[in-house]
Each structure stands twice: as C-alpha cells, then as structure tokens.
Amino acid sequence: MKITRIETCGLRGATPEGGWSNELRPDDVVHTLVAVHTDAGVVGIGSAFTTQHLVDAALEVLSPLLIGEEALDVERLTETLHQSAFWMGRGGSLTHATSAVDIALWDVVGQALGQPVGRLLGGRHRERVRPYASLLMDEPEVLRDNLVEMVDAGFEAFKIGWWKFGRVDAATDERTVAAARQAVGDRLLAVDAGGSEAFFPGTLAWAKRTAEMLKDYDVAWFEEALAPDDIDGFVELRASSPVPISGGEVLTRRQSFLPYLERRAFDIVQPDTTKGGGLSESRRIGWMAADHGIRLVPHGWNTGVGLAADLQLASALPGTDLVEYKTGSAYVDDLVSGGWRLDEDGTLAIPSAPGLGIALDVDALGRYGTNPRFADVGR
C-alpha cells in the first residue's frame, strides 16, 4: 500500500480564543488537517497544531521522503522524517507536520488491518476514558456560570487556565480558583497558569506560594506554573509542592522530554500529539514516563482529530485515564461526524472502529476548511 499524495486543510472561521498575548481571531488558522492518500484508496487523517502555511512548507521538505513509500511502515517513516530534519527545522514546523502525518499513517494502518489504532499501539487497556472540560478563566461570576454549564452537560472533570492567573495578584488568583471550586463541587479540578504565554511573569517564588493555595482547594494538578524551558525551576517546584505539577505541552520529540522525566520535573507529563511528533512519539513518551513514575495526560487544545488520537493513545497506555476536551470549539464538537457524547458517568467511549475510528463531517469541512477538495476525505 503506497503513499500517493498528501493534502492539507487549515481550519478557520471558528478558531476559539487561546488566551495568548496576541489573542486569536476566528479566521486565524492555527490547526491544520492532513490527509495521507494511498494507492489502495485508503485515506488517513491527522491534525497539526500550527498554521497551514507552515505545514505546507514543511511538506515541501518531507513529502519526497514519503511519496511512493509503504504506508504501513508508520514508525520507520516518521522516524526517517525526524532523522532527516536536523538541518531544516527539527523540533519546530517540520516536527509539527510530522505529527499530523504520523497520526494519519496510524489511521491508514488501522483501516487496512481492520483494527482501532489503540490496539495497534499495544492493546486496549480501557474502553472509556474521562475527558476534562478545558476552558479559559474569566471573572469569577462568568467563570462560575461557564463551569456550571459544563457540569450540566455531564462533565465530571475540569481545568481552568490562563487569563489573569499569576499576572495580577494573589487575591485575584484565589478568587478565581474559589469560584471554580464552588461551581464544580467535589469534581476533579485542575489549574493551568499558562506559563508558555509570551513573557509570562510568574516566578518560582510565586509558583511555590500558589501551589500552597491550590492545596486548600483540592486542585488535582498545577499546570505550566513556570516558563516551559525552566527545568531547574520545575524540579525545585515539584520537590516542594503539595499538589502535583504538570507540563510539557510545547515540547517536541521524545528526546526533549527525557531530561524532564529523568530529573522528575513533573508528576504529570502532557505532550500534545498534534505537535510533539504524533502518536508514535506520545506512546514512547508515555512508556518513558511510566518508567520514572510519571503519568501522561495528553494536552488536547486542538481538534476532533486530535481528540480521537488522544482517545486511542489513552486506550493503549495503562496510566492515562484522562484526556483534555476543549469546550466550545466547533473544531472539536462539529468536525467529527456524529459528534461526541458523554456517558452518564461523564466518560467518552474510545472509538472501536478501524483506524482512529472516526469520520469527518463533510458539512463542517465545508464551513471551516480552507481546501474545498478536502471534503472528499470525509468517510
């Protein structure tokens, strides 16, 4: 089964706010779908957390290493892409594009073998997984209303992040967390400082004080409390923190994660499968993390394709019992045919159909996709 062509499709028109310093607008393209076509007519779908222009440029470099190759050789192909990228953008746009290609190739293999990707990644440890509703912080009253709406929708786990947290004063931080805890009751609640924002002002001293406050509100983990590259700070913070520390969403490739795992900078590591290297890398990071006593909970502020990949990953890793669900995003809620439905206990069924186990919604592709031809891949 040979690879014949690769297509891309950016998503625009409903891009949600990201909490970034330069806030995203609805027509900004920051998520790009990738379709890998084969001579057998099987088409695999992946997703990259970066703009279509960068994915297209990356594929100019990467496509010659893929076209005509055996599509079933997923890890041989994607490792070749990683190994060939040293001089042309390794770790950046080439790695982001490789992530989408890797996800799409796993989708191809699953369809070809009639098996869900999670089984091919090693086996299904679970058939359902709990998604946590992920949303940006806001003024306490607004945040409370937004969370209550998600409780009413059936979610049993939540994460709030970014906004003014760590950027104004301790009183603002605590009021925000107190409002969230009041809204969700005794359900799981995590807090994300958004330390990867440009010029994030949070210091190690601030993070240590804030971790003590979060303990009083029974917060499940404290995410991105420091700038992503501050490995020494994370090591010191984790050693003193009364709540679990998490991070890693902007790191790419397993090699970048290894120092954080070896030094036990995190209790929970959070690679983004749509940028860190795809399912192949996330699985390797998951097993490395387990060997160091660290959980993997994937970062998933992306698309319905990214969510499908994370669900398959969660089925294949024994310790991954949570996935991130970006609430209020048409690229998550509408992109997959049939949408997503929470069970009565607030869990999502992990698709058991071949490949990623999803079909793209043709109407949603028509509304949000930048490539009209891409609607043909809706299965």
Image (cartoon, helix red, strand yellow):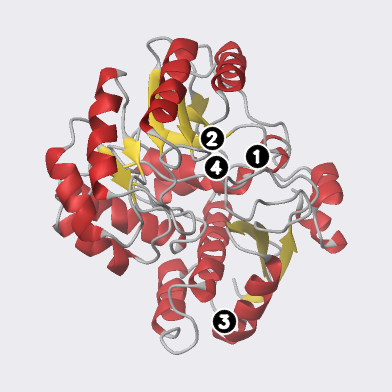
Upstream in sequence: badge 1 or badge 4: 4
Q: Residues within 10 Å of mark 1 (few under 14, many from 20)?
A: many
Mark closer to the observer (2, 3): 2
Q: Residue at x 68, y 52 (%)?
A: 24
Mark positioned earlier in the residue sequence (1 or 3): 3
Disc assigned to residue 220: none
Query: Is the Cβ of the residue at disc 1 closer than 8 Å to that at disc 3?
Result: no
Picture coordinates of residue 259, whole percent (x, y): 20, 63
Relative to 22, residue 331 above or below? above
130, above or below 122, in the image: above
Look at 31% across and 33% down and name the residue there: 221
Image-based side of 88 in relation to 57, left or right:
left
Q: Which residue is painted at 56% across and 66% down in the image?
A: 101
* Residue under pointer 4: 307
**Circle 3 residue:** 62
Find residue 87 and report its image quarter. bottom left
Q: Secondary structure at mark 1?
A: helix
Q: Which residue is mark 1?
A: 332
Q: Residue at x 57, y 58 (%)?
A: 49
Residue 230, quarter of the rendered image: bottom left
Q: Amino acid at mark 3?
A: Leu
Helix, strand or loop at mark 4: helix
Q: Is residue 237 left or right of residue 167?
A: left
Answer with mark 1 or mark 2, whichever residue precedes in sequence: 2
